[in-house]
Amino acid sequence: MSTQQKRSRPRFGPLATSPGPVPDLDVDALLDDRGTGIIVCCGSGGVGKTTTSAALALRAAERGRKVVVLTIDPARRLAQSMGIERLDNTPRPVDGLRTNAKGNRQGGGLDAMMLDMKRTFDEVVESQATPEKAKQILENPFYIALSSSFAGTQEYMAMEKLGQIHADAQADGSYDLIVVDTPPSRSALDFLDAPERLSSFLDGRFIRLLLAPAKGPARMMSAGFGLITGALNKVLGAQVLRDMQTFVAAFDTLFGGFRQRAQKTFELLQADGTAFLVVAAPEPDALREAAYFVERLGEDRMPLAGLIVNRASPIPQGTLSADEAMAASARLRKREPGSLTAGLLRLHADQTRMVEREALLRERFAAAHPEVPTAVVPALAGDVHDLAGLRRIGQLLAGA
Amino acid sequence: MAAPTSDADWSRVRLHVVTGKGGTGKSTVAASLALGLASQGQQVLLCEVEGRQGIARMFDVDPLPYAERRIATGLRHNGTPPGVVHALHIDPESALLEYLSMYYKLGRAGRALDRFGVIEFATTIAPGVRDVLLTGKVFEAVRRNSRNKGAISYDAVVLDAPPTGRITRFLNVNDELAGLAKVGPIRSQADTVMTLFRSPRTVVHLVTVLEEMPVQETADGIAELTRAGLPVGAVIVNLVRPRDISPADLEAARDGTLDASRVATDLEEAGVDVADGLVDGLLAEAHDHAERRALEDAQRAVVAQLGRPTYELPRLAGGVDLGGLYELAADLKKQGLA
Ligand SMILES: Nc1ncnc2c1ncn2[C@@H]1O[C@H](COP(=O)(O)OP(=O)(O)OP(=O)(O)O)[C@@H](O)[C@H]1O
Ligand SMILES: Nc1ncnc2c1ncn2[C@@H]1O[C@H](COP(=O)(O)OP(=O)(O)O)[C@@H](O)[C@H]1O
Ligand SMILES: [Mg+2]
Ligand SMILES: [Mg+2]
């Protein structure tokens, strides 16, 4: 990196680190806009989606919104401090919100819940089927696998829950802002793809065959089907196929309802009141995922509010370059092996290198997506596990 | 780096399974371990099963097919010629087709399976089948038999495995299948695989960083693996910050009582221009670092309580490129894991 670039890099404040003319993400404007009804935090795993959603929800509540945050997998201490360590699949009020100088929060409030994927699925089955039929489904090994480990079920259920909370909030006015965390999938796209994946799976050729082997369009089909069932029985044993058939038959009548609701939630996500925030760490994989996601939102006409680069290395002060710092550190260490200043210089060199690398990664992202408003949140020295920590992240998000 | 040393002996291990919380560095550690083993002259296969092409990205090669590709050579060490690292990207569909053609003469039925979407069905939902296939292929690579003619045989296989939350279930295909395929060839294959996985030829290493959530997950993972009778290997602490500032100085940094004038004098003597708020900047960096280090030390103590051989890898400030992988490999070798 040239000295000129280095000098032109402003030194303080998280927003000041945006490379080039990237627009700043105005978080407070987003939170204060009564038209914002849903905020979805997406991104690949471990980047800080849960932390960011909780921090945004808290900030919005303390600015007067009636907020519910749907978290997926909060760290234990964070869950404790929000009073949601018990998984009961219903929003619970969060205590300890800060009041403003006048001693109120302008009517704002915060509820939080942690998603129980299996329970959400079970509840949907129970609400859609007769008790006997529900029981039959809930006990089927294929249903158990689908509801507890199918890649995408967690995303699907997060959507399902979002749909439920939204419908309830519309009906009784309990919330005016829903903040949604998304599951820790490897790809941010999973959140959008999961419902479709599940329905196309349940709509797949094989399932249709299982449902109506006799009604196949031609003899060819049933001949093929016989071969298949023969092969499967040979490989898996006959019980498996029977379980499969029971499951598919039982599930078929339910599925129309599922699909319809997923479609409605998808439309909700496309509506104006929704804002997607893509969270990424300043790492190649995370930013690549973020870029895919941004492109995908565009294709699906879903409203992107901006990018949050979380856990950025804080910008070191001064203009001492990494190489100079390392050289000076080596000189000092030669004289005095345990030199404190040598250690400090080494830290400074590492920090500078990381900041430069991250800036480069962000520049690459911005080159491909220059229009995406961005907020940069530095890595805090400590963990974020209580309301004070969330408040701090909220301030940094807002550039305040 | 002054990392904890261990006299554990891993030389008889044929299958190194590398797991950890998402994003802690499983893939990086698996790749470094493979390089480290190759630097001892071993022929190594590095496998991935999550469909992410992480190996191709790390080694900067084209996306890997379902075939073993030579991707790197270990470093020459004490005159021993280095071994080679091959890589394999295992996807369940290909594994199922290969499996069927290897063990069954299905003929037309085999093709029909694909045409009717059965392969997709079996590999996406049929409980456990996916994991049976993935682990089955890993098993095949470890225990090459006469059915796979002309295949390379390896001294060690390194698996970039699913994350801690899914690892026990993944390796424990037997239990998964219990409710499902009670008889039949898949079941007996699963039993053979379990025998290898539970033997001292297999170890499951857990990668973590020194933060609360990943360390907690590591502890839970070890307990779960142990309960399932799976052999827990080492804990590999990744992304460790430098530890060259003394405990007393760290404490002073946290309290804000570091001697600024001493630092300024040192800097001047080392020929560094101290204008521009450099000293204040260094002290502020020191404060944050010291706070992070305190958290790390607390978590390091928790890791020590886990009672597993522990290895540490530094956080490379420039990120991990191929050179970085060799650097980490050398570090693992020095500490005795590879
Ligand atoms: N020792 C290290 N020094 C610097 N960067 C590292 C180190 N180890 C890993 N990284 C970086 O951290 C990021 C995550 O690492 P990696 O992909 O290996 O993690 P993973 O556990 O395999 O993640 P996933 O759960 O997504 O598969 C990568 O960008 C990698 O280059
Ligand atoms: N800006 C930050 N500074 C310091 N720690 C952070 C920051 N953002 C997140 N963390 C920590 O990183 C860990 C992972 O964050 P989390 O929000 O659970 O990620 P995700 O939901 O994307 O998997 C948590 O321990 C959290 O406290
Ligand atoms: Mg999360
Ligand atoms: Mg990986």
Image (cartoon, coloured by chain):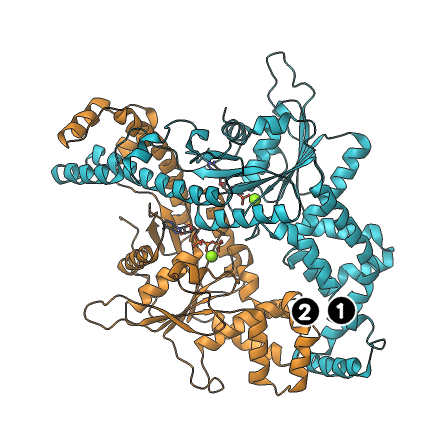
Query: Who's the residue at 36% across and 39% down the image?
Result: A355
Residue B22, percent across and down? 50, 52
For chain A, what colour was chosen?
A: cyan
Q: What subunit carries mark 2?
A: B
Which quadrant holds residue A327? Answer: top left
Please tell me the numbered disc located at residue B121.
Answer: 2
Q: Is residue A209 above or below residue A199?
A: below
Badge 1 residue CB within 8 Å of ligand 1? no
B269 or A76, nearer to the observer? B269
Task: Find residue A317 and report its image quarter.
Answer: top left
* The C terminus of chain B, quarter of image: bottom left
Q: Where residue B229 appears, x then y in whole percent?
A: 51, 65
- Residue A370 in picture, x, y percent from top left: 50, 40
**Is disc 1 placed on a helix, strand or loop?**
helix
Q: Is residue A165 above or below residue A200?
A: above
Q: Residues within 10 Å of mark 2 (few under 14, many from 20)?
A: many
Q: Colour of chain B?
A: orange
> Residue B41: percent from the left, percent from the top?
28, 72
Q: Are marks 2 and 1 on the same chain?
A: no
| Chain of the residue that carries numbered disc 1 in the rendered image | A
Could you say which is closer to the camera, residue A275 or residue A72?
A275
Amino acid at dot 2 = Phe
- Give the residue pinned by disc 1: A207
Can residue B178 be seen in this snapshot? Answer: no
Q: Amino acid at mark 1?
A: Ile
Cβ–Cβ below 8 Å for labels 2 and 1?
Answer: yes
- Give left or right: position of A314 versus B96: left
